[in-house]
Amino acid sequence: MSNSVTTPGIRHGRLPAELYASHFDDLYPVYDPHEAMVAADRCYFCHDAPCITACPTEIDIPLFIRQIQAGQPEAAARTIFDQNILGGTCARVCPTETLCEGACVREAAEGKPVEIGRLQRYATDALMARQGHPYARADSTGKRVAVVGAGPAGLACAHRLAMHGHEVTIHEAEAKPGGLNEYGIAAYKMAGGFAAREVEWLMGIGGITLETGKALGRDLSLDQLQAGFDAVFLGIGLGDVNRLDIPGENLDGVRDAVEFIAELRQTEDLSRLPIGRDVVVIGGGMTAVDAAVQSKLLGAEHVSMLYRRGREAMSASDHEIEHAATEGVTIITNATPVAIHGQGAVAEVEFAYTDGTGENFRLRADQVFKAIGQKLAGMDGLTMEGRKLAAQPAAGVWAGGDCTGGGEDLTVTAVAQGRDAAAEIHAYLTGNGG
Amino acid sequence: MADLSTNFVGIKSPNPFWLASAPPTDKEYNVVRAFKAGWGGVVWKTLGAEGPPIVNVNGPRYGAVWGADRRLMGLNNIELITDRPLEVNLREIKQVKRDWPDRAMVVSLMVPCDEDSWKAILKRVEETEADGVELNFGCPHGMSERGMGSAVGQVPEYIEMVTRWVKQHSRMPCIVKLTPNITDIRKPAEAAKRGGADAVSLINTISSITSVDLDSFSPEPSIDGKGAHGGYCGPAVKPIALNMVAEIARDPATAGLPISGIGGVTTWRDAAEFIALGAGTVQVCTAAMTYGFGIIKEMTAGLSLYLDDKGMTLDQLQGRAVPNVTDWQYLNLNYVTKARINQDLCIQCGRCYAACEDTSHQAISMSPERVFDVIDEECVACNLCVNVCPVQDCITMEQLPKGATDPRTGHEVGDYANWTTHPNNPMASAAE
């Protein structure tokens, strides 16, 4: 018997098989060359351009767009990669509407910014399609650096260090490199196995050894790394998730959104991935949106996303929230979960309005995704800043990405932090400043 | 609706929009389509002398310059005059004129530079009952290598000589089409007038190479890896054409000589500008070749609407701007303006700042908050900021009133005064 969107429970194959591919394909298709020319022509080549300032990696955006205009997308890609070696991912996943495109003067002028993200993808795709890696390594320095975590921060750091001639070993806890690019971002943003392709391309510079299945605190210790390498970079992300701490949290059908997204990203045939008929997502960030939208795309009949405060306080961007709404996700704000009800498995989630009415309501649910934030797993002997690692948490140890502060947990910030840590490590290893 | 009917040196047409001598007017089929669409007249594609038909290249005839969205900005061609048999063209001209008596039918001609050749072709054209002839002294490519086209147009004495032959051997109105590939357009115009031309038409195309293929290193359009210069036309050439029309319209030696304006006319607005500079009709080619004949409806409707809005007749528009075209030396040096930036419209792109700071007079300031202001003490009113600003009317030039002090020069704004009386001019005529 086959399932449909209205089949109760957590079921796979709710949709006709042919729909899955299109549902999880690129959200924004790649420009063809003519579209890219027209889009690039809209750039004003602003003086001291606001888009550059708004980019955490400070890509010279007007320059790369002008290079597209001048018919050299590959030169444009060099401009991008010089600042951000994960420019391919950032082109796909950056919340550009709050970064470069939000700062674009055409956004102010006409509410329609230059489509910087899509242009960046056009350029980076062009260069990455070429055989070979575009950067060459400096002469070997004989120095060895351990990078922990093959996510955006670790990869950016490793690439820059390798470029400077250092030998880098990346230790990755998971089976595959990429971090959230591989496990944590909606599939339609990273279609076509891009995360894996990008890592392979990036490693093409040489001088980087990848060891997967090696987790800090489980398979290796910081002491070992400090003893065995000249410097250490920690890009370990946020390994732990927050709990709701309400009754019923342990019922069947209740799980962390990050775990669900990771499973989805690693599922070859999405028609085999079960999803509830009535899905409730708790949280107001990007992870909540990614979980909610993909639930809908998998064929859930009703998907609700609930956030305890108002819409303006949601960390997901307006653009993301609009996308969720367009896909049919019901967004309810100012409602906090108080209990999850059910016999063995979840049947309903009870919420209380937080806007002072004192009223409670229940939503039918056969699946609940918790997306109420991640946190750093316990770390001993390292300097903290608040709940996160300091940028240099120990002597000879640097850190960057989501495990450190200041970045709103954005991929692009992780890249900037990894890259900048590499510069500091390079200076430290070669005795130049630092 | 304003009346657009035109009488140009005795040639009548329901509107001043003619198709220029070019591929669109090479055949009865095309011309009939044009007349059905509403074009006022045509100049039939240039006929050559009796004999074996002209041969064209069998590779590309056109090269182009495009904007980002493939908008055609300029077109270049290496096509020669008509390559169809003379008798066929003449027969079709006669038939079309008979079928469309209210439309202007002018025949473009280019034959070798001897009196007999001209005498012979004129007789044949007269038999068609066409309204007039246009002498093609303009094409810069191909035929010029054989002593025709611009090779004639570049020598005023030849223009005068041939024009005189034409007037001597024909009763038809004679329009002389001028090449822009000369130093001073007034000289060939004067020569045409001396020869008895009823009118001049200009500009023909400009010698050009549109691009170079950076792989094959061939100029475009490429014929088997080689290229010859072509004739450039389309929107890109309009400013050059407007100036040349104005030069002829305002020069005392040629003032009053009827002009058919040609060069980048794409919309009614372009046509109105040519007419304001003295043109009696305009001729269109590239716009029609780009968009087809349907554009005539925008052109006629647009010109009518403009005239209605202005409460003017077509005659009143004609030449209206000519008195305002002058020499630099007569420009008012006491017309002092300053750039003004409308902060409500400014989108803070900073292009005005970059242009002024890098390439001009450092007369625009930029605050850390990206507020751009004009520094009157430095602003020479060059207008570059206005031209590079992407927002229309965001930056405007504001005139300082008489009696105000220009903060840049410390001088008070006075009455009209020009270079001819300026103290720095060694040739200044004493004012006292």
Image: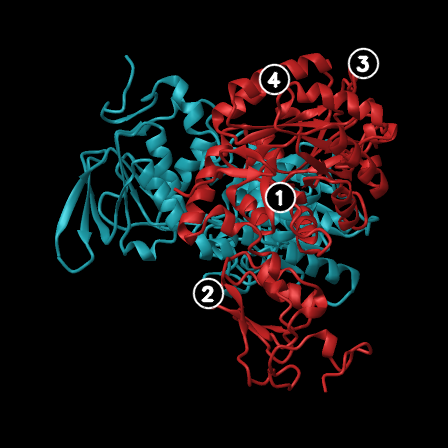
Chain colours: A cyan, B red
Circle 2 is placed at which residue position? A386
- Check if mark 1's residue and mark 3's residue have beta carbons within 8 Å: no
Which image quarter holds the N terminus of chain A?
A: top left
Circle 4 is placed at which residue position? B94
Circle 3 is placed at which residue position? B51
Exactly how many numbered labels are in the figure?
A: 4
* Left or right of residue A285, residue B280 in this image: right
**What's under tag 2, amino acid-wise?**
Gly
Please say whether residue A143 is visible from this viewpoint. yes
Secondary element type, mark 3 = loop
Mark 3 burial class by Cα count in 10 Å: few <14, some 14-19, many 20+: few
**Image x and y of residue A92, in percent:** 52, 41
Q: Nearer the viewer, mark 3 or mark 2?
A: 3
Q: CA distance from mark 4 to mark 2?
A: 93 Å
Q: Nearer the viewer, mark 3 or mark 4?
A: 4
* Left or right of residue A164, residue A239 in this image: left
Report the front residue among B37 and A277: B37
Secondary element type, mark 1 = strand
Discs 3 and 2 carry the same chain letter: no
**What's under tag 3, amino acid-wise?**
Gly
Discs 1 and 2 carry the same chain letter: yes
Q: CA distance from mark 3 to mark 4?
A: 20 Å
Circle 1 is placed at which residue position? A171
Q: CA distance from mark 1 to mark 2?
A: 26 Å
Q: Earlier in the sequence, mark 3 or mark 4?
A: 3
Looking at the picture, does residue A57 appear above or below residue B265?
A: below
**Image x and y of residue A266, in percent:** 48, 30
Report the front residue among B192 and B265: B192
Q: Nearer the viewer, mark 1 or mark 3?
A: 3
Q: Residue at x 81, y 45 (%)?
A: B182
Q: Nearer the viewer, mark 4 or mark 2?
A: 4
Q: CA distance from mark 3 to mark 2?
A: 95 Å
